[in-house]
Amino acid sequence: MGHVTMNQKHFDDTTPPTIYRLPFSLLIMLLIFQLFFAACASQAELPAQVIEAYYQALTKKDLNTMISLACPEWEEQARNEYNSFGAVTTQLQGLRCQTISQEQAKARVNCQGKIIANYGNEVLEIDLSKLTFELVQQGGNWRFCGYPK
């Protein structure tokens, strides 16, 4: 067992693999850049993700999530939207949102897709592409705060 044949390679425990021969400071710097760029990319899309989550919660009848994604000024309207769809069957069709502007603690989002609401005798399609959504950043989180005036 402790015997090494000529065909086996013997590695000394003090010899690091080739990948570790890069200077440690270079590895740290690469890691920092990677984290920085990942944070920038996800931050740019975060407002759009909030709107997608809000409308997914609306169609799943999840009032708590809707309120958690709304700014305090929009909470009453979130409840109204929830109540207006509460008695009907709803589904999202083709929802895709993108952040169209973002300045400091404010952002605007546009979406593609529809809410399809089945009222029994009538089917209503709400085209989300006709709306612009306004968000504000509060406590480090983006919150849906209505439609621009």
Image (spheres, rainbow, N blue to C red):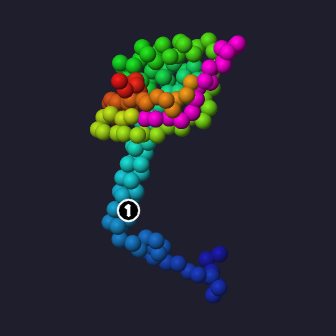
Q: As rendered, which of 16 and 100 lies closer to the eye?
A: 100
Image position of 84 with respect to 136: above or below:
above
Whether residue 49 appears in this view of the structure is: no
Nearest the eye: 139 or 115: 115
Residue 15: image location, x then y, percent: 45, 76
Whole-percent x, y for residue 123 in the image: 66, 19
The crowding category of the residue bearing disc 1, from other C-alpha atoms within 10 Å (few below 14, some 14 to 19, many at least 20), is few
Q: Secondary structure at mark 1?
A: helix
Instruction: Determine which residue is flagged by label 1.
Output: 30
Left/right of residue 20 with respect to residue 86 in the rendered view? left
Residues shaded magenta:
109-125
Residue 40, image x, y percentages: 38, 48
- On screen, residue 26 versus residue 79, left or right, reads left
How far across and down, in percent of the image, does residue 39 sit?
39, 48
Q: Quadrant of residue 138?
A: top left
| 59 vs 12, nearest the viewer | 59
Q: Amino acid at mark 1?
A: Leu
Toward the front, the furthest residue is: 130
* Foreground pick, 58 / 102: 102
Q: Is residue 96 magenta?
A: no
Callout count: 1
- Magenta span includes 119: yes
Q: Residue furthest bottom?
A: 6
Q: Identify which residue is drawn at 43% across, 70% down.
A: 20
- Residue 93 visible? The answer is yes
Q: At 57% across and 19% down in the image, what residue appears?
A: 61
Q: Residue at x 36, y 39 (%)?
A: 101
Q: Is residue 85 above or below residue 137?
A: above
At 54% from the left and 22% from the top, the residue drawn is 58
